[in-house]
Image (cartoon, grey):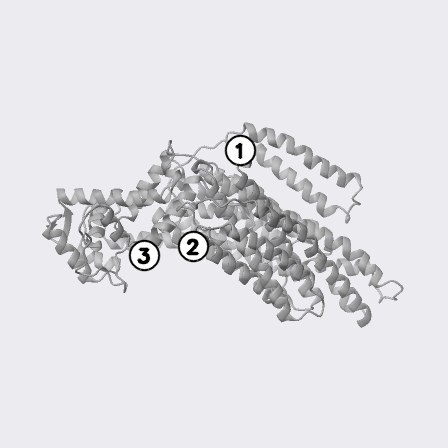
Amino acid sequence: MAQDTPGPAAAADGPAPSHGPGNGTGPGNGQGPGAEQGRSSAVGVAIGALLLGMLLAALDQTIVSTALPTIVSDLGGLEHLSWVVTAYMLASTAATPLWGKLGDQYGRKKLFQTAIVIFLVGSALCGLSRNMPELIGFRALQGLGGGGLMVLSMAIVGDIVPPRERGRYQGLFGAVFGGTSVLGPLLGGLFVDHLSWRWVFYVNLPVGVVALAVIAAVLHIPVRRTPHRIDYLGTALIAAVAVCLVLMTSLGGTSYPWSSWQIIGLGVLGVLLVVPFLRVERRAAEPVLPLGLFRIRTFALCSVIGFVIGFAMFGSMTYLPTFLQVVQGVSPTLSGVHMLPMVAGMLIASTGSGQIVSRTGHYRVFPIAGTAVTTIGLLLLHQLAPGTSTAVMSVYFFVFGLGLGLVMQVLVLIVQNSVGYENLGVATSGATFFRSIGASFGVSVFGTIFTNKLGPRITDALAGVTLPPGVTPSALQADPRAVGRLPAAQRSAVLDAYSTSITDVFLYAVPPTLLAFALAWLLKEEPLRGSVTAPDASEVVSSNPVERSSRDEAARALSLLGSREGRRRVYEKITLRAGLDLHPAAGWMLLRIKRDGHAEPALLAERADIPVRVITDAVVQLETRGLVDREGVRLTLTAPGREQADRLFRAREEMLAELLGDWWTARERPHDLEQLVRELSTELCGSDAEQPRDDHGQGPRPNHRLH
């Protein structure tokens, strides 16, 4: 998990040197708008390449699901279907914290390129797989690269984009996740229907090559590295525990009897490995999972609830396409279409709940309602049958997605609100880590239940029946396409066996979600900090844990809140707080001149898209009061102007600091938090992102005064 590293040395802790005042880049340093537009264009291209990298990892979490029935039919081994998903999830979850720390320590550009190469090699090998064991192994390799794509792309944004703009770009990354949640199942179906399931993996190659080329050409990251004492042993141990327990649940009753020495041995080994893991974490300088977090009641509860939600969400999303394609007989493409109501419910509810909590400050109702609706959704999914209509299925899928969405975003928000600033990063990472591990277990356990139920039911359905040559119960279990070779009566019986076996897994998921529902009632609602905002889709839809430091989390929240305030008359507020009688536009211009050293009114009006009359009125007021001097077309501050600009600046700082609540008012305030507030205040003051506007979006009213 992310570990805090105070101070400005961390590469993700501040913008690149190419941003901000006093570094030779602003207007006050002799460079015109052309140079700044060139830099902005280069940053935009780099962001596009990062989005492509993120797209690769995000798409791979959703595009494979609709192709899975065809993959197992082609390669055989339906009992190992879950491992095609689980291998990727476990590898990416275990690798994510390592990529983050290594990026801090050795520089992110080369590591990001390395992650892309690993991901592309894994993708190519997945497409070339000749059997299920090969595919599972190559999926694990792909997951190692995917974990790096996720964490490094978000961290690099912090290297090249100033904090005031990070909220906008983080929104783009969230949109990528939301988009891939919808497009992934559809694209997977299209490739299977019109090309081959192998193109689900091959499609990554051209996109990845373009991303590699663009990153090599345009991505320039400041060389500022943060040393870490990386918890390699802790990471290896927790990964080993997870692998042992997931192997036990996925192989038990299928490849080996539950009473076999192999299954018992895996379970015992997994439990025994917990002991050295706990000892290592107590002594580690930067533990992968700080044990002290579990003394925080809210964190412990949210971790369990998140585990269950990940369990239900990814387990269901893996096996619903199998139901649709095998039992309902729809094409892979249409199975992706049928999944859209669930994705829509999830995205609508997660976005809506996060926004409502951020605005009202009340959150306890959402985990309770979300786990309850998720339980109802699972019970509805258990009712699915071969004859269920599309309309009814869509309602069931939507209800299930709605339940997941109600709880997913809010859990991260609750955890962030429950910890001190020093634990903000690791608590966020820890909560999302348990959701990721829950996803791995969900896919594995659902697969075991499905396989254990399917074989005996097919055998019973075909007892005493003469089968066509080459068709046996084991063949029907390994290759769903063989069902089509059966006579109508036997085909219906086998489809019922498939249907019941798949829908049973949803019933088995009900007790864990009921446990989560009960635990949700134990959550206590505490006053919501102003700086705690709803996370974006990349943090809640992804199966990967979030990996950011406390400072990164605070910067993300304040940048989002700062831009939101910019649309709410921020300059009226700070002039009132500073006790000044100025137009909001005049206060904005004072801060702009303070930041850049000078300002050209005509150029400001053009660049900031503010009406010339608004700028003119502000200039007249500043000149009349002796707050600025004119040097040709440029305005500079006088001594009184500097004094009033300083007062406005302090007022802006105070407004940002108030959002931090007790993180800011703590007896020992973190030094890096003070630096962050100062940095953000400098960048936001007079920025184009925060413009004074009237009720019609046309700038302040000419005769408006604040008293």
The disc label shown at residue 171, or none = 2
Closest to the observer, 416 or 365: 365
Q: Earlier in the sequence, mark 1 or mark 3?
A: 1
Residue 294: quarter of image: top right
Query: How packed is label 1: few (under 14 Cα within 10 Å), some, or many (20 or more)?
Result: few
Q: Give the residue type that dot 3 points to.
A: Arg
Task: Name the amino acid type tagged 1.
Answer: Gly
249 left or right, relative to 2? right
Q: CA distance from mark 1 to mark 3?
A: 40 Å
Above or below residue 400? Residue 305 is above
Q: CA distance from mark 2 to mark 3?
A: 17 Å
Evaluate if marks 1 and 3 touch, with contact meaning CB atoms under 8 Å apart. no
Task: Tell me which residue sits at (51%, 42%) in the image.
Answer: 429
Q: Mark 2 or mark 3: which comes first in sequence?
A: 2
Q: Which residue has dot 1 on it?
A: 292
On the question of residue 284 being in view, the answer is yes
Picture quadrant where residue 72 is located: bottom right
According to the picture, the residue beneath numbered tag 3 turns out to be: 567
For the point 47% across and 33% down, the residue is 228
Residue 49 as seen in the image, left or right of residue 301: left
Q: Amino acid at mark 2?
A: Gly
